[in-house]
Amino acid sequence: MSATAARTPARVFSGVQPSGLPHLGNYLGAFRNYIAMQEGNDEIICIVDYHALTSTHDAELIRRNTYEMALGLLALGLDPDKAVLFRQSDRPEHAELAYLLSTVVPVSWVERTPSFKEKKRTQPDDVNHALLTYPVLQTADIAIYKCRYVPVGKDQAAHLELAREIIRAWNVRYGAVFVEPEAVFTDSPIVKGTDGIQKMSKSLGNVVEIFAPEEVIRKQITSMVTDTQRILRTDPGRPEICNVCQLHRFFGDDYETIWEGERTARTGCVDTKRLLADRVLGAFSEARDRRAELAARPGYVEEVLRAGAERLAPMARETLRETHERMGLGGSEAPAAGAPAS
Ligand code: AMP
Ligand code: TRP
């Protein structure tokens, strides 16, 4: 390609569960790529409320969290003039495509998905059927718009690998209609939580939120587990394994100086946490103001979500039409007169 040839915009898709207020794991692992990749690409971001039903059964909570997640993304810089933001249940074609794709998926593929095994352990009294087919719906989300690039955190790598296998299996059976998607990671694909061990996750309660009140964010950061072998203030710290030090890499360009302070015990964990809290609050102060502004505009978020879903309707319908045709569904030309019935 010559240097002057116009680049074809790449199709980008990602989904986020309406699990409440965004946290640092979401932002550093995925949302910053949503915001970077909206420039010059055809990007679609979806609040996946169907997926949330696999674990949350409180209708009001799903609705409120959908609003909060959309508001948070807009405040963080997702621009509805550049990317499409919509709610999954406003495009029910996703559910239909999931059913159609599921016909090529051996049960063993979904039974061995790590997230399904994990859910069997964490919600043993609610191992519902939709949990098993969760990755098939995720595949349909991406496939229905024929998207290639999928910005996600590392916890989604297995789902993306499965999506590729499902799409490959369907394309082999019916012809190349769908695009095999590729995960796109940031340089912090797994952000650890305040416990310093598990990945940061709302359901584990180990998050640093972005839009919580200032005192809450300070408290969340102060509660972070650091280097557990650093007991006395005078003990040298090990920044490589300290989660607070790791997070400093993303909030200022002097993290090496901060790390050196820890190594030489010139600074203590409390100082380093305080500094991190100041920087996190500083980094998101504009987004926090913007969130307040947008929240004060009645109906704004709903308007963005509805317009997004509307824009996607022709593409979703066209993909389904093509899929029906390949799979032998729906009407076609009447069989020629006298042709044998079978
Ligand atoms: P979820 O809230 O689980 O739908 O996550 C939304 C996006 O954030 C997904 O792409 C996740 O992979 C990503 N994400 C969530 N938690 C983390 C984390 N602790 N580290 C990195 N990425 C994350
Ligand atoms: N499973 C993803 C998560 O928990 C959410 C999701 C649903 C998604 N559909 C998607 C992510 C399609 C990327 C592409 O974070």
Image (cartoon, grey):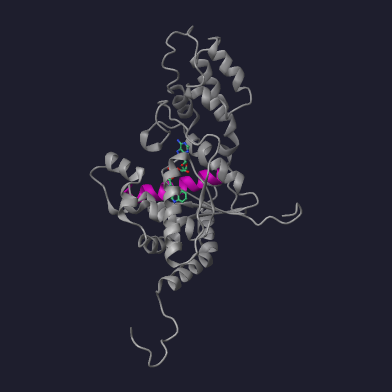
Residue 162 rendering spot, x and y as whole percentages: 41, 50
Q: Residue at x 57, y 43 (%)?
A: 33
Q: Nearer the viewer, residue 88 or 129?
A: 129
Residue 36 rendering spot, x and y as whole percentages: 61, 44
Q: Nearer the viewer, residue 19 or 143?
A: 143
- In the image, residue 6 sits, relative to residue 24, either above or below, namely below
Q: Residue at x 44, y 12 (%)?
A: 230
Residue 84 rendering spot, x and y as whole percentages: 56, 55
Residue 331 rendering spot, x and y as whole percentages: 41, 80
Q: Residue furthest bottom?
A: 338
Q: Which quarter of the rendering shows the C terminus?
A: bottom left
* Residue 172 is inside the magenta segment: no
Q: Residue at x 55, y 21 (%)?
A: 275
Choose top left, top right, bottom left or bottom right for residue 101: bottom left
Q: Which quarter of the rendering shows the N terminus?
A: bottom right
Q: Residue furthest top?
A: 234
Q: Which residues are magenta?
A: 56-75
Q: Residue at x 46, y 22 (%)?
A: 222
Q: Nearer the viewer, residue 244 or 184?
A: 184
Q: Residue furthest right?
A: 4
In this rendering, does residue 131 appear at all?
no
* Residue 69 is inside the magenta segment: yes
In this rendering, does residue 79 appear at all?
yes
Q: Nearer the viewer, residue 334 or 236?
A: 334
Q: How many marks?
A: 0
Magenta: main secondary structure:
helix
